[in-house]
Amino acid sequence: MAWTEVDSATTSPAETDIPFGPIGTKTSFQGRVRAQLDNLPSQHDHYTLIPTYCNQAIEEIQTLGLSMGREMLDQLPRLRNWRWWDVTIAGQNWLPLPERMLWLEAMFYAESTAAYDPSTVTLKPSSEPQGANDDFGLFSRTSTGWPTLYRRAGSRVEFWPTPSISPTDYRATVVLQGTRMDNILSADTDTLLMSPRLQLLAIDLSVAVSMEKMGWDEASEKRTQVETKLGRLISPGEKERARKKTTTRVAGSPS
C-alpha cells in the first residue's frame, strides 16, 4: 500500500498568498523572481527553467530553516499537524515515511487494518523509546504485537514490536502526524501554504538559486542575505520561548 494523506488546508481571502504566475506579471511569484533577475528575457536559456528553480528554492528554504531551529515550524501553521495513514506489513517492523512529510511529530495506531476514518476509528498512541534512540535496535526482533513504540530512522519510521499474522494478526493501521512539505507549484493559480512573510523569502531564495544556476557573481551575496533574513524571521519564536521564566515558591510566594 501507500500513505494516504488525510488532511488539507483551506485558504481564505484574508491570507495574502502569492499566485505562482504568470511569469510576465510582476506581482506573481515567478514575475517577482524574473524582475530581480534583471527582467530575464524569454530568449534566455534559463528562462523556461525559472519554475523549476522556484520549486527547488521552496523546498530548500524549509529544510534550511529547520537547520536553524525548530522555531521554523511556526512559519508553517497551515502545514502542521497533518496526518497520513497506512497499514503495517506482516514480518516488517518499518514503513517508508510519506514523501511529502517534513517533520514527524507523533504516531498512532488502530488495532485493525481498516481504512482510517477520523470520524469512526479510535486510535491509540505509540511512544518514542525512553533514553537513547539507538537503544531501539536492542529490542527483541522476535517479539510480535501492536506497534506501541516508534522512532524515525532516516527515511523510515520503525516500530516495535514486529507485526505478525499468526497466531494473532497484529497488522495495524498506523497514522503519522507531522509537518508537511509545501505545495509544488505549477499552474499560475497555485499558491503556497507557508506564511506570507516566508513566501517573500522563498522568492528571494528562488532568485539566489537562479543566479547560482546561471553562474552570476551576485549569487553568493544574495544567498547570504536570504539566510540572514530567515534567521531574523524565525528568531522571535525562539525569544518568546526563552523569556518564559521558571518560578519557584518560597514560603508560598512565587519568586
Image (spheres, rainbow, N blue to C red):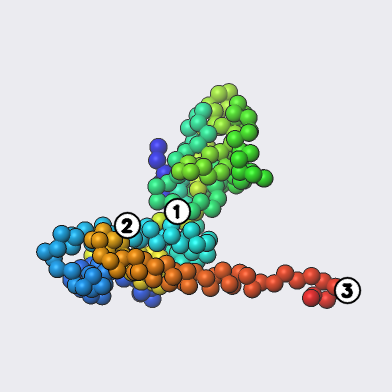
Contact (Cβ within 8 Å) of mark 3 with mark 1: no
x then y, percent, for residue 164:
54, 28
Q: First in sequence, mark 3 or 1: give its number.
A: 1
Q: Quadrant of the N terminus?
A: top left
Tell me if residue 19 can be seen.
no
Residue at point 19%, 60% (across, down) = 46
Crowd around label 2: few <14 · some 14–19 · many ≥20 (10 Å): some
Q: What is the three-letter code of the residue carrying label 3?
A: Ala
Q: Is residue 188 left or right of residue 150?
A: left
Tell me if residue 217 can be seen.
yes
Q: What is the three-letter code of the residue carrying label 1?
A: Leu
The local secondary structure at tag 2 comes to helix
Residue nearest the viewer, comparing 84 with 43? 43
Residue at point 53%, 61% (across, down) = 70
Cα separation between marks 3 and 1: 47 Å
Q: Disc 3 marks which residue?
A: 251
Q: First in sequence, mark 1 or 2: give its number.
A: 2
x then y, percent, for residue 240:
59, 72
Q: Quadrant of the C terminus?
A: bottom right
Closest to the camera, between mark 3 and mark 2, is: 2
Q: Disc 1 marks which residue?
A: 102
x then y, percent, for residue 175:
50, 46
Contact (Cβ within 8 Å) of mark 3 with mark 2: no
Q: Disc 2 marks which residue?
A: 56
Q: First in sequence, mark 3 or 2: give its number.
A: 2
